[in-house]
Image (spheres, helix red, strand yellow):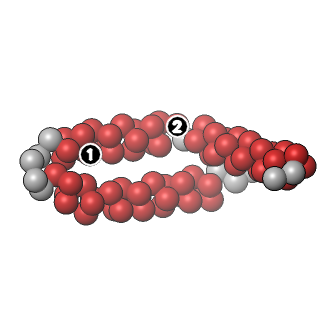
């Protein structure tokens, strides 16, 4: 891997992280609350023997899609 290619990938990653941070800062209470809620729900489901993993597998896509919908709504409503 050439050094120029490395710096290009590093720049793309840095830009991706900065844009993600800007999007998060547009509505940190909503996204932080969603993250905390997801952590609590998944933590509680993890405690259920045998069925916990299955329930997490069923609930995780729903939670992830709600995060994507929230991010899209935040992006569209707060355009400057």
**Is residue 8 visible to the viewer in this orientation of the structure?**
no
Within 10 Å of disc 1 (Cα), the crowding (few <14, some 14-19, many 20+) is some
Total numbered labels: 2
Q: On residue 28, which mark appears?
A: 2
Q: Which mark sits nearer the N-terminus, 1 or 2?
A: 2
Residue at 70% x, 53% y is 79
Quarter of the view holding residue 57 = bottom left
Marking on residue 70: none
* 43 or 76: nearer the viewer: 43
Pointers 1 and 2 in contact (CB under 8 A)?
Answer: no
Q: Residue furthest left?
A: 49
Which image quadrant is residue 35 in?
top left
Q: Residue at x 45, y 54 (%)?
A: 67
**Circle 2 crowding by C-alpha within 10 Å: few under 14, some 14–19, many from 20:** few
Q: Nearer the viewer, mark 1 or mark 2?
A: 1
Q: Which residue is mark 1?
A: 42
Q: Position of residue 55 (x, y in %)?
A: 19, 58
- In space, the residues marked 1 and 2 are separated at their CA atoms by 21 Å
Q: Residue furthest front?
A: 1
Quick check: 42 left or right of 1?
Answer: left
Q: Position of residue 44 (x, y in %)?
A: 19, 41
Relative to 64, 51 lies left or right = left
Q: Residue at x 20, y 44 (%)?
A: 46
- From the viewer's side, name the closer residue of 37 and 7: 7
Horizontal and vertical percent position of residue 51: 12, 56
Q: Secondary structure at mark 2?
A: helix
Is the residue 64 above or below the residue 49 in the image?
below
Residue 42: image quadrant is top left
Q: Dot 1: what SS?
A: helix
């Amino acid at each position: 891997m050439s050094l120029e290619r490395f710096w290009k990938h590093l720049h793309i990653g840095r830009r991706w992280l900065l844009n993600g941070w800007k999007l998060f800062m547009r509505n940190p209470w909503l996204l932080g609350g969603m993250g905390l809620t997801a952590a609590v729900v998944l933590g509680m489901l993890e405690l259920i023997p045998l069925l916990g993993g299955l329930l997490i597998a069923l609930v995780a896509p729903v939670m992830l899609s709600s995060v994507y919908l929230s991010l899209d709504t935040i992006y569209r409503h707060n355009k400057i």
